[in-house]
Every structure is written in structure tokens, then in C-alpha cells.
Image (tube, rainbow, N blue to C red):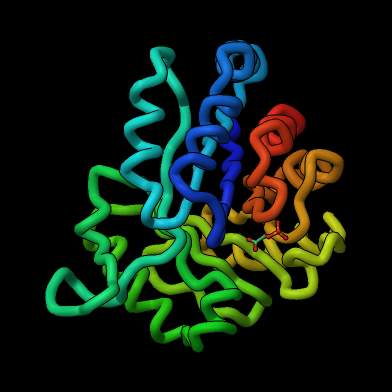
């Protein structure tokens, strides 16, 4: 059974009220029914991963559990501390989010650009995530970006495609994905200006295992449509 990862990166968006509105609409019973039926029918697992900002994680975890249908939605954090728990003001360590999230996005280009994150820091964060038993999703911007040991999922996100409305071509994304796969990374996602109109062009390719979605994941209908068409 092929697995497709559909990751929503909310970045620095939404307060509690807005998150409630999203979840209520996103997890409507018709969408959930459709999801269950389509997974059985197509022998395809769609792993839906919502990555809200830290302050929403426990609220979202509660909301997802409270909805009385078996909801195949997982949570992820958008970043993690390179330190273990301790005296590190403002940091959230991997062991602190155990039980809340399954995944952690690490090394997004916005963190590299705005906070000066280096490959070395990314590797330290990956180590902490793995030590806590969490699954890192490491963002890489080019073919030469190093992938730390133990990483099973990466998201190839060329800088020119992020938030620009100009996605990479599926052929180029596949070429880069194949390079990473041949160096031993099992799952390669594509990210950058993914919409419901273009998602299938990427996910229909054997060598691309899903998408990481920014802007188009903020609206529940638009993200649901991406999942349906993936
Ligand atoms: P975008 O963002 O979908 O808005 O281009 C993708 C990302 O930054 O992960």
C-alpha cells in the first residue's frame, strides 16, 4: 500500500478561536467518511499531518480526540529545541512534546533565513527529535543540503517555489527526489506553492511521497480539497 504524506504547515498563523473554526469545518463528518471510504477503495494511505504553532498543539490534540469518529489525523511541531529539557528560556524540547505530536518539521528555509539556522544546528535538532522517539521531517532547499543520519522523511522545497505561486516543475522535483532516494532517504515530499490544482501532478509520481503545504493549508476547504485530489 502506497503512503502519501499531506503535511499542513500553518507557520505563524491562527489563535485558538481560529483553530477551532478550522477543525470544526475540516473534520466535518462528510469529509471523514469520504476519507475512510477512499483509503479502503484505493489501497492508499493518506497520512494527514497538521503542524500548527506550539501554542495550539494541546488544544488541537484535544479537539481531534473529542471528535467521535476515528480521525486519521496526526500532529506535528514546526520546530524543536536543539537542547534537552533544562534551563533554556523560550525553548520547547523534544521530550516536552512527546505524547502530543508524532512528527517535527526541522530546518524549514524560513528558520534558516530568519534565525540563521545552520546544517549543524539542524543536525542537533534531528538528534533530539530522534532521541525522544519523534519523526523528523527535514526541509532541504537544494540537492546539496545535507540530510542528518536517521532521517526517514525529507521535504524538498526550492526557495523560489515557497509562497511565490510558482511551484517547481514535477519533473525537476522528481529528479531531485530521486537523488535523495538513491542516497538512502525512504520518503521525499515536495513543498512550495502546492494547491489543489497542482497537487496530483506531484503525488501521482512514484518517487514523490507527499507534499508539504503552507498557504493553501490555512483554509479547511482548500486543504481538504488537496487531500482529496492527492
Ligand atoms: P507554501 O509554503 O505552500 O505557502 O509555498 C510551503 C512551505 O513553506 O513549507
Left or right? Give the position of 96 relative to 173.
left
* x, y percent for residue 60: 40, 38
Q: Which of 114 and 99 is in front in this view?
A: 114
* x, y percent for residue 134: 31, 53
Indicate the quadrant containing the C terminus: top left, top right, bottom left or bottom right.
top right
Left or right? Give the position of 125 relative to 118.
left
Q: Which residue is drawn at 39% across and 29% down?
A: 63
Q: How many labels does the image show?
A: 0
Left or right? Give the position of 131 relative to 87.
right
Q: Residue at x 37, y 54 (%)?
A: 55
Q: Which of 54 and 33 is in front in this view?
A: 54
Q: Relative to residue 72, is residue 93 depicted above or below?
A: below
Q: Where does ligand 1 appear, by image quarter? A: bottom right
* x, y percent for residue 58: 31, 43
Q: Relative to residue 189, is residue 31 depicted above or below?
A: above
Q: Which residue is drawn at 52% across and 31% down?
A: 23
Q: Quadrant of residue 217?
A: top right
Q: Relative to residue 15, is residue 33 depicted above or below?
A: above
Q: Which of 99 and 135 is in front in this view?
A: 99
Left or right? Give the position of 215 relative to 89.
right
Outermost residue, front side: 17
Q: Residue at x 45, y 22 (%)?
A: 71
Q: Nearer the viewer, residue 118 or 113?
A: 113
* x, y percent for residue 196: 79, 39
Amino acid at each position: 500500500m502506497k503512503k502519501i504524506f499531506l503535511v499542513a504547515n500553518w507557520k505563524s498563523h491562527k489563535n485558538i478561536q481560529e483553530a477551532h473554526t478550522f477543525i470544526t469545518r475540516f473534520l466535518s463528518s462528510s469529509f471523514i467518511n469520504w476519507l475512510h471510504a477512499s483509503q479502503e477503495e484505493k489501497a492508499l494511505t493518506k497520512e494527514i499531518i497538521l503542524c500548527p504553532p506550539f501554542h495550539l498543539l494541546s488544544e488541537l490534540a484535544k479537539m481531534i480526540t473529542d471528535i467521535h469518529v476515528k480521525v486519521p489525523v496526526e500532529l506535528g511541531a514546526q520546530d524543536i529545541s536543539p537542547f534537552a529539557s533544562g534551563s533554556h528560556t523560550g525553548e520547547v524540547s523534544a521530550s516536552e512534546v512527546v505524547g502530543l505530536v508524532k512528527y517535527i518539521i526541522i530546518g524549514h528555509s524560513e528558520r534558516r533565513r530568519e534565525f540563521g539556522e545552520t546544517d549543524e544546528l539542524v543536525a542537533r535538532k534531528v538528534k533530539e527529535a530522534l532521541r525522544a522517539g519523534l519523526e523528523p521531517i527535514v526541509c532541504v532547499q537544494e540537492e546539496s543540503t545535507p540530510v542528518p543520519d536517521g532521517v526517514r522523511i525529507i521535504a524538498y522545497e526550492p526557495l523560489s517555489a515557497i509562497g511565490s505561486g510558482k511551484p517547481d516543475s514535477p519533473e525537476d522535483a522528481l529528479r531531485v527526489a530521486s537523488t535523495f532516494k538513491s542516497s538512502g532517504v525512504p520518503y521525499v515530499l515536495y513543498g512550495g506553492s502546492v494547491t489543489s490544482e497542482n497537487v496530483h501532478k506531484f503525488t501521482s509520481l512514484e518517487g514523490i511521497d507527499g507534499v508539504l503545504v503552507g498557504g493553501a493549508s490555512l483554509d479547511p476547504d482548500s486543504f481538504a480539497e488537496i487531500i482529496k485530489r492527492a
